[in-house]
Amino acid sequence: MTAASVSRCLALLEFLAGERDLVELSELASGFNMPVSAIHRLVTTLASRGWVIQDTASNSMRCRLK
């Protein structure tokens, strides 16, 4: 992992910490000016480490802090 990816990951965690509801990945991608695929990789990594919860039941993927 590079310093830039660590910085993006921490920024994502800080953003999610301020949210009570599930956030759509497309909203995160727009807010962070990143492709949805990059946000998806970050969220998937954080979910595998137990930091976020992903809602895959809906048509669009959403997440929040655990």
Image: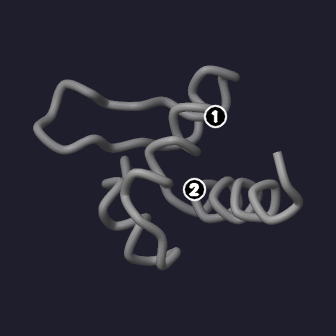
SS category of the residue bearing label 1:
helix
Q: Position of residue 41 (x, y in %)?
A: 52, 41
Which amino acid type corresponds to the residue marked 2 in the rendered image? Answer: Leu
Residue 30: image quadrant is bottom left
Q: Position of residue 20 (x, y in %)?
A: 47, 52
Could you tell which of marks 2 and 1 lies nearer the N-terminus?
2
Q: Nearer the viewer, residue 50 or 1?
A: 1
Residue 61: image quadrant is top left
Name, please, the residue furthest toward the left: 59
Q: Nearer the viewer, mark 2 or mark 1?
A: 1
- Disc marking residue 46: 1
Residue 10: image quadrant is bottom right
Q: Is residue 7 left or right of residue 41?
A: right
The quarter of the picture where the C terminus appears is top right
Q: Is residue 42 above or below residue 28?
A: above
Name, please, the residue furthest toward the right: 3
Residue under the image location 40 percent in, 51 percent down:
37
SS category of the residue bearing label 2:
helix
Q: Is residue 66 above or below residue 41?
A: above
- Disc marking residue 16: 2
Residue under the image location 42 percent in, 42 percent down:
63
Residue under the image location 66 percent in, 22 percent down:
50
Q: Nearer the viewer, residue 21 or 1?
A: 1
Which amino acid type corresponds to the residue marked 1 in the rendered image? Answer: Leu
Q: Position of residue 13 (x, y in %)?
A: 68, 53
For label 2, the crowd category at 10 Å Cα-Cα, with few meaning under 14, some 14 to 19 and many 20 or more, is some
Name, please, the residue furthest toward the front: 2
Give the Cα distance between marks 2 and 1: 12 Å
